[in-house]
Structure formats: C-alpha cells, structure tokens
Amino acid sequence: MRRALGGLMLVLACTPPILEENKEPAWEVVHTGETLGGAMLAVWGAGENHAIFAGGGVGNGQEALVWTWDGSRLSLRHPGGTDTFWWVHGTSPSDVWLVGEHGRITHFDGSSFVEHTRVLDTTLWGAMAFSANDVWAVGGMPGRPSGAPNDVVLHYNGTQWTQEVLPGTARNVALLKVWGTSAEDLYVVGERGTIWHRSAAGWELQSALHSPALADGTLFSVHGCSATELYAAGGNTLLKSNGMAWEKLTEPALRVANGLSCGAGRLTVVGFSGLKVRREGAATLDDTRTQPFDNLHAAWTAPNGDIWVVGGDWVSSSTAGSVREGVIGRYGKGRVKAELAR
C-alpha cells in the first residue's frame, strides 16, 4: 500500500501544472530548446493568426529553419539547404521572402519554397517587401574582412535582383536591416552607426549629417510606427526620427539591444539576456526579468498587439552536427497552446 501511495505521489509530483489562461497580457515561452532545430533569428506575420519564424544552424550544418503559426498550430516547414535565414518579410502569407547566408534569397508562397539566383556571396541580414515586384535586401560581412562584399543593397523588380550603387566613397560596412513605407521612403542601418535614406531624390547618408555622430557602434535594427515615427537600435543606443531628423534617446535605457518592433501603439526593443523593454504611451516597462530569458534577436508586433520574439544561441562557435538551442516567445492575452506539427 505504501509503495502504491509513493508511486502515486511521484506521478503527481512530476505532472506539470495546468496553466490558467492569462486574463491580462503576459510573456510566455511558446517553444524552446534544441527541438526547435536551431537558433530562431527572424519573425514576421501577416495578421494576428499568421506568423512565420526563421533561422537555422548558423554554420553547424543543419537545414535552414522555417516554422509557421496559423493561430492554433506551430508547424515546421522544410525549405532545404543549410544556409541559415537571417530575416523574413512579406506582403501576405503567400508572398514571403527569406534571406540569409551566402546571399541566399528564398521565396515562400505558403506551401513551397523557391530559391532565387544569388547576386553576391555575402550574408543578407535584412529584407523588406512592398509588393511582388518591389522587394529590398541588405547585407555585408561584419568586421570588414578584406575583399568581402559590403555596403550591399539589392532590389527585386519582379523579374530579377540587381545591386543598388550607393553614392560617394564606399564605407565598407555591413548593412543589417531595412525598413520603410515605400521604395521612396526607405531606411537602411548598419555598422559604424550608418543610416541611409532613400527618397525620390535618391540615397542620402543621414548619419553623416550629425557631428558628433549619434551612434558610432553598430545599429542592428530599424523599424517604424509610421513615416514620421521610426526608430533605430543597437547595443545601448536608441535613435528616433520624425521623418526629417534623428535624435538620440536617453529613455528607455538600453543594453545589448538587437531588434525592435513598433506597432499597435507599442515600441518593443529586445536583446541579449532576455532584454525586453516596451514603451506604451508615456510608460516604459522593462520585462527583462520575465521569460523568455534567452538571447533575443528580433521582435514583431501583430495587429492585435501581441508581440512575438525569437532568439537562442547564434553567437557560439560553430560545431558541425551540433544543434543550437532556439526560442519563440510571445506577449499577449491568453496562452498559445500550440500543436506542434513536424
């Protein structure tokens, strides 16, 4: 009898608790660990019931990663190839672009993946799609290795990808993210505090307009709420523009920032060691001490205000055959009880 009771107590102790629905918005870990298949580096969605997450092994030899969310199921897709995806953006669930290592450019129509001809052998870190015949990608090799393609801006006109030539003397920097409201209101950020703006008049190096420079480190991300409210972030730097000029913000105070997202009245900045800082109206909220605690690389805000974040281990040295840990997290009401389809 004692053995039976002891066994019952052990079973009860090992049974995970039933989690109640969040009545107020809260952070949760949707999926994590090596079972994700690698580091998660990018997230974008077409609505509150659609999101796509991308990443990969970052040199470890695994297949590139794509997971999709349809409002009830988190499904693993198989794009093929071992070159990791570093960014994803699209115009709809059937028009999604993924870019990554060695100039990889892949189109996803919701069911199948099509590889595009690679223009340059350099990592593409960011992409922005306005329509099926107006897509932008940026890239380069951080650290400016000798002879590596840098200052890379590519454009797709619906038929082919071509490289945009930036004016002036080459800065020899990696360009890391791109965002805009149109091809004539486009922002690109990167190493050495670089900020480019493309208007109807052409390209302008906006970071060169400030002395001293607003940022001398790397700007890892740029995103806007509108054409007159946009942000750029990297490390402990957060910049804001009204569409005319940039300024450096002192609040919220940041450290090791990697990505940001603006939408539904919320500005979210994420980074290493679970950095999650939100600005809602006049309030600044630091959620770093809530899960997920992983290194976070990117964020996306759904139309209903849900915030999706991704990250994991993308900085450790590559080891062939080793599977990196990844994480997908979310901030919102209720809980995502995702059915995993592999």
Image (spheres, rainbow, N blue to C red):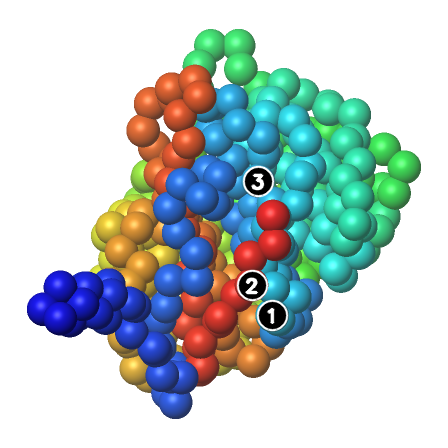
Q: Which residue position is annotated with label 3?
A: 65
Residue 19 is left or right of residue 236, and the answer is right
Sequence-first disc among 3 and 1: 3
Q: Disc 3 marks which amino acid?
A: Leu
- Whether pointer 2 and pointer 1 mark residues with C-beta atoms closer than 8 Å, the reply is yes
Tell me which residue sits at (61%, 54%) in the image. Answer: 341
Give x and y (percent) for residue 211. Answer: 35, 45
Seen from the viewer's position, the closer of residues 139 and 98 is: 98
Seen from the viewer's position, the closer of residues 65 and 281 is: 65
Name the residue furthest bottom: 23
Name the residue furthest left: 2
Q: Disc 1 marks which amino acid?
A: Ser
Give x and y (percent) for residue 83. Answer: 59, 27
Q: Which residue position is annotated with label 1?
A: 72
Task: Establish if 72 lies above or below 112.
Answer: below
The crowd level at tag 3 (other Cα within 10 Å; few <14, some 14-19, many 20+) is many
The image's mark for residue 339 is 2
Q: What is the quadrant of residue 101 in the picture?
A: top right
Tell me which residue sits at (77%, 40%) in the image. Answer: 113
CA gap between label 2 and label 3 equals 18 Å
Residue 2 is left or right of residue 171, and the answer is left
Q: Is residue 188 visible?
A: no
Seen from the viewer's position, the closer of residues 11 and 235 is: 11
Task: Establish if 187 lies above or below 227.
Answer: above
Q: Is residue 104 visible?
A: yes
Tell me which residue sits at (71%, 54%) in the image. Answer: 90
